[in-house]
Amino acid sequence: MRDFMTPGRSLAVAERGMAATSHPQATLAALEVLKEGGNAMDAALAAVALQGVVEPQMTGIGGDCFALYAPKSGAPFAFNGSGRTPAAIDLGKLTREGLSVIEPTSPVAVTVPGAVDAWCTLHDRFGSLPLARILAPAIAAAEDGFRITPRVAYDWARNRARVEGNAAAAAQYLPGGAAPQVGDRRAQPALGATLRAIAREGRAGFYEGAVADEIVAELGRLGGAHTVGDFAAHRGEAVTPISAPYRGHEVYECPPNGQGLAALMILRLLAGYDVAALGEADRVHLLAEATKLAYGTRDLFVCDPAFGPLDAARYLGDDHIDRLRGLISREYALTRVTAEQIAHRDTVYITVVDRDRNAVSFINSLFASFGSGIYAPKSGVLLHNRGWGLNLDPAHPNALAPRKRPMHTIIPGLVMKDGRAVMPFGVMGGQYQAAGHAGFLSNVFDRGLDLQAASDAPRSFAYDGVLSLEPTYGAGIRDDLARRGHRVAWADGPLGGCQAIFIDHAAGVLYGASDHRKDGMALGY
C-alpha cells in the first residue's frame, strides 16, 4: 500500500479487462474495445494506432514494432515487425562516395517500416473485430483533431529541431513555426486518409499503391535506394521467444534482432545475489555492472539473425553467466565496456489483458523523436530512422547490408508462471529498455513493490561510460557511487516509461500500472 500523504499513483484494480498505455486517449480507446467484446489484440492495436496520431513524435505507421502474445492457455507467441534495408543499398558504394557515418536524418537511416504489416498480420491471426473498427479512434483523432497533453508538449518542443529541416514536416508539426502547447488542438488529415486506406485494404493500403509510391519518391529525391518492390516485398515474421528464469518466474523476450537477450542476461546476473538485502546504492551499483556486461555482449553479437545466427542459450547458460558475474566487484566499478554510440530514443509501449486472460505486450517506435524527420505529406507518413543503428564496419555483425534488419532497442516483455501469463510489461526508452526491464522486475520480485511503486521508483542507467541517475536518488547515493569509480551524472530527463498488468489468476483480479513520467494511465473494468 502506498503512502497516501506523498505524491504518487494508486494501482489500477479491475476484474474483466485492463489496458495500460502512455496516453490517456489510447488507454480509453483500448478499454472501449474490450467493453464492446473485442479481445486483447483488438484493443492493443486500437491503442497503438491512436498513439501514432496523438504522440507523433514517438510512434506511427512509419515505424517498426514487436509484440508478445500469450493466449489464455498455451505457449507465448512473438512477432518481429521490424523492417529491412533496401535491396539495392551498397555499403561499399556509399563509403566510396564518402559516407563515414549514418546521419539520423538521412534516407540511409530509413528502413522499410514494419508496423502496418505487423498490425495487419496480428489482426488476421488473433483479432476478432473488423480492422475498420479497430482503426476508427485513430482515424477520428487524425481527421477531427486531438488535444496536446503535457508530456507530448514537452517532447515535441524539446525535439522540434528534427522536423525543422524538412519543409513538409515543419508545415505539419510546426505550423507558424511553433511547437504546440498543452491543450492546443492538432489534426493530421493526410494520415487519417492513409489509415482509412489501411482499414479498407489492409497492408496493401500502405505497402502498395499511392502511399508506397509517395514514400519511395520522397526517399529517392533525397538520395535513398528504396523501391516500391522493397515495400511490396516486406513481411514481418513470427518468431520463437527466448526466456530465462527469475525468482520462480519465467521471463520472455523477443529474440534478436532485438535486445531482449541483454535484459535476460542482466536478470541472470542479478539472480546470483540477494538483491532484497542490499542497500539502495548497492542495488544501483549491481544493476550498473550487470548492464555493462550484458550490453557489451549485445553490442558485439546481436544483429539480424538471417545474417548472424546467435545461440541465446549459450549466453544465458550458467557457464557464461558465472564467468561474467565473476567480473563484478561490490566495491569498484568496471571500466568501460564496448558499446555502440547511439543515444536514448523514443517509443510507445502498450499492454492489454482481456476477460479471457489473453495478454498482449506491444511496442511501436520511430526510434528518434520524430524519427528521420522525413515526411511524405500526401500520405501523412513520418518515417523512422532505425537504420541509424547499423554499423559501417563491414566485418561487424550489425553492418549495413541489403535487406537487413538493424539491431533493435525496442522490446516487449512477458512474465509467465506455471504455464500461464502473469504479467505483460514493458519499459520504453531506447538503449535503456533492457536495463529498465531488469530493474523493474527486480523491484517487483526482489523488493516486493507493487507494480506502480516499482515503476515510480528512481531509475539509473549505466551506458557509454556514464552512470545516469534520476535526481530523486539524492546526493548521498550519487556520492557513494562516485566513490566506487562510477562517472555519475544527473539524468537530463526522465529515464524511460513503464506499463504493466499483473494477473492474479487465483483471485480473478487485474492490477495495472502506468508510469508517472508519461501522460498515460492504466484502467480496467
Image (tube, rainbow, N blue to C red):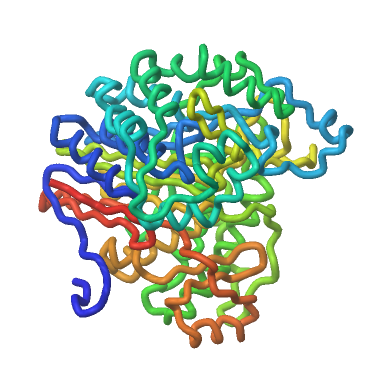
Who's the residue at 25% across and 78% down the image?
6
Q: Is residue 156 above or below residue 493?
A: above
Residue 400, located in which quarter of the rendered image?
top right
Q: Nearer the viewer, residue 323 or 200?
A: 200
Figure disc tally:
0
Who's the residue at 30% across and 22% down the image?
131
Quarter of the image where the N terminus is located: bottom left
Residue 75 in view (yes/no): no
Who's the residue at 50% across and 47% down the image?
260
Residue 253, located in which quarter of the rendered image?
top left
Q: Nearer the viewer, residue 236 or 177?
A: 177
The x and y percentages for residue 353 are 23, 42
Who's the residue at 61% across and 36% down the image?
167
Whether residue 483 sits left or right of residue 147 in the image: it is right
Q: Nearer the viewer, residue 114 or 378?
A: 378
The x and y percentages for residue 137 are 28, 32
Q: Is residue 483 above or below residue 123?
A: below
Q: Which residue in the rendered view is the most extreme toward the front? A: 176
The x and y percentages for residue 331 are 59, 82
Residue 112, located in which quarter of the rendered image?
top right
Q: Nearer the viewer, residue 171 or 397?
A: 171
Whether residue 306 sits left or right of residue 46 in the image: it is right
Residue 341 in view (yes/no): yes
Q: Which residue in the rendered view is the most extreme toward the right? A: 96
The x and y percentages for residue 427 are 42, 54
